[in-house]
Image: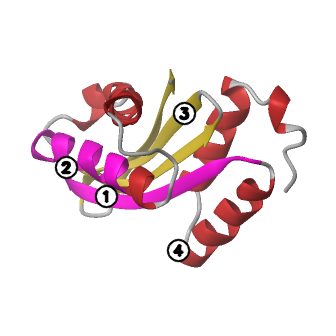
Amino acid sequence: MTIGDNSALGSKDIARCAILMCLTKTHNEEKELAAKFAEDGVRAAAVDYGGEFITSVMKIIERTVVASKREGVINDSHAEEGAVAGAAREAMSQVMNKAIGLNVGGKIGVARCGDHIAVAMLFGIGLLHLNEVAMGLGHRVV
């Protein structure tokens, strides 16, 4: 997949990359897609998560920040960590009403090019196999 000239990439392009990362099915697919994005100057990461929503909020945000640092999407600065944490919080807040009191699980996708950072979260929300599916998306500029 070619995104094109990365000097023209904006928030919608980076959000699309984050969404595609969170839709991957396997870790191999994550790595392949991240490598394709890297060819166009987009750094990307993905990580799985799960648990009871209320008690997992901080853990999910931490996993997003740690995966972003581990994969080189952000560096170890307060501004970049805060941008990812803020975008993750925004993504979670978009599905909060559906998720409160239930279990959640899914995948987080993070993408960055230049100043734009996007976090997309795919949620399975519910009990046992009776799940609702939802997606949240947050964007920040560093």
Residue with the mark numbered 1? 49
Q: Contact, CB < 8 Å: mark 4 with mark 1?
A: no
Mark 1–mark 2 Cα distance, whole angstroms, equals 9 Å
Residue found at x 60% / y 40%: 112
Q: Is residue 49 left or right of residue 138?
A: left
Residue with the mark numbered 4? 27
Whichever of callouts 1 and 2 sits on the residue coming sooner in the sequence is 1
Which mark lies nearer to you, 1 or 2? 2
Magenta-drawn segment: 41-66
- 20 or 80: nearer the eye? 80
Residue found at x 66% / y 44%: 17
Q: Is residue 55 visible?
A: yes
Helix, strand or loop at label 3? It is strand
Helix, strand or loop at label 1? It is strand
Instruction: Tell me where residue 36 appears, x and y as whole percent.
Output: 76, 61
Q: Is residue 139 left or right of residue 132?
A: right
Mark 3–mark 2 Cα distance, whole angstroms, equals 20 Å
Q: Contact, CB < 8 Å: mark 1 with mark 2?
A: yes
Whichever of callouts 2 and 4 sits on the residue coming sooner in the sequence is 4
- 112 or 128: nearer the eye? 112
Whichever of callouts 1 and 3 sits on the residue coming sooner in the sequence is 1
The quarter of the displayed image where residue 34 is located? bottom right
Residue with the mark numbered 3? 117
